[in-house]
Amino acid sequence: MLRAGCQLLTQSTLPTGKTVGNSFALEFVRWRRKPRWLPVAKSKMFRVPERKKQSEEERTELMRLHNQYKTQLRSVRQFLREEVVRHEETSTADHIVLTPEQEEAEFQKCLDANDAWNAAIAKERDQRLAKEREKKVAYVQERLELGQLREEERKEQANQRVLLEIERSKNYITRENLDAAIETALANPVDHNFAIDMAGNLYQGRSTSQLPNATPEPNQQVLSN
């Protein structure tokens, strides 16, 4: 109704001399039914809808269709049940018909097929295990060789360190050369003190008489920037 009314309103209000391209249509979008999230209207809250009365002819026809549907459904179920029973009886009969010799031959045939499958799988397994064993042996051999090389390198480094310590031990102070070391230290005193002037000259020693502007002495150094 709203769309039809809007179209009539548009056609009546637009001038007849204008083209269709310049026309416009005013259309309102509303819910055709009440949204589901709105509650029941107060006018319909306590209203009980009346049950539609059914005529005798309609009730009879519906009952006939219902009975026909139930009958067909029971027939389908009975047919499927008989099919299952027939299949079970046929399978059992076929099994009973077999003689003991035939059963033994069938069983032996299955055993032979099973043995053949087991032999093929065992062969594949043996080949796979042999390859894995070879790879593992090669890996272990490689690790042993690397370990041996590392051990040799460690021994070589240890020998070099021992030789270096032996060479250094020649200058060690022992009980035998303790007096000589003391005399050498007293005869050659070492003074680690130094001084720096404003010009950046470095003077070694605790006492010195060198002036900043004089010529540098052997114990005087010039600091670089």
Image: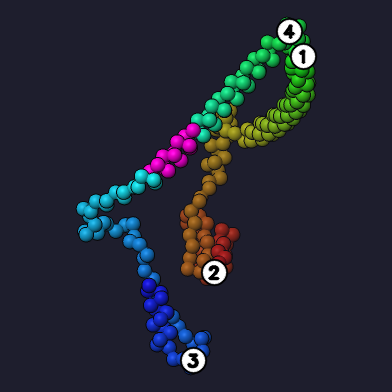
Q: Which residue is mark 1?
A: 109
Viewer-nearest of labels 1 and 4?
4
How many circles with numbers are drawn on the protein?
A: 4
Q: Which residue is mark 3?
A: 18
Viewer-nearest of labels 1 and 2?
1
Q: What amino acid type should be assigned to the residue bearing mark 1?
A: Lys
Label 3: which secondary element = loop
How far is disc 2 from disc 3 in space, using C-alphas? Answer: 114 Å
Instruction: Report the predominant secondary structure element of the magenta stretch.
Output: helix
Q: Residue furthest front?
A: 57
Label 4: which secondary element = loop
Q: Are marks 4 and 2 in contact (CB under 8 Å)?
A: no
Q: What amino acid type should be assigned to the residue bearing mark 4?
A: Thr
Q: Are marks 1 and 4 in contact (CB under 8 Å)?
A: no
Residue in the image at 67% along x and 14% along y: 93
Residue in the image at 47% along x and 68% along y: 198
Let me know if residue 102 appears in the view: yes
Q: Which residue is mark 2?
A: 214
Q: Which residue is mark 4?
A: 99
Q: Residues within 10 Å of mark 2 (few under 14, many from 20)?
A: few
Q: Are marks 1 and 3 in contact (CB under 8 Å)?
A: no
Upstream in sequence: badge 1 or badge 3: 3
Q: Position of residue 211 (x, y in %)?
A: 50, 67
Along the line of sight, the residue nearer the viewer: 116 or 21: 21
Viewer-nearest of labels 1 and 3?
3
Image position of 69 (left or right of 54): right
Upstream in sequence: badge 4 or badge 2: 4
Q: Residues within 10 Å of mark 4 (few under 14, many from 20)?
A: few
How far is disc 1 from disc 4 in space, using C-alphas? Answer: 15 Å
Upstream in sequence: badge 1 or badge 4: 4
Image position of 83 (left or right of 124): left
Which residues lie in the magenta part? 59-71
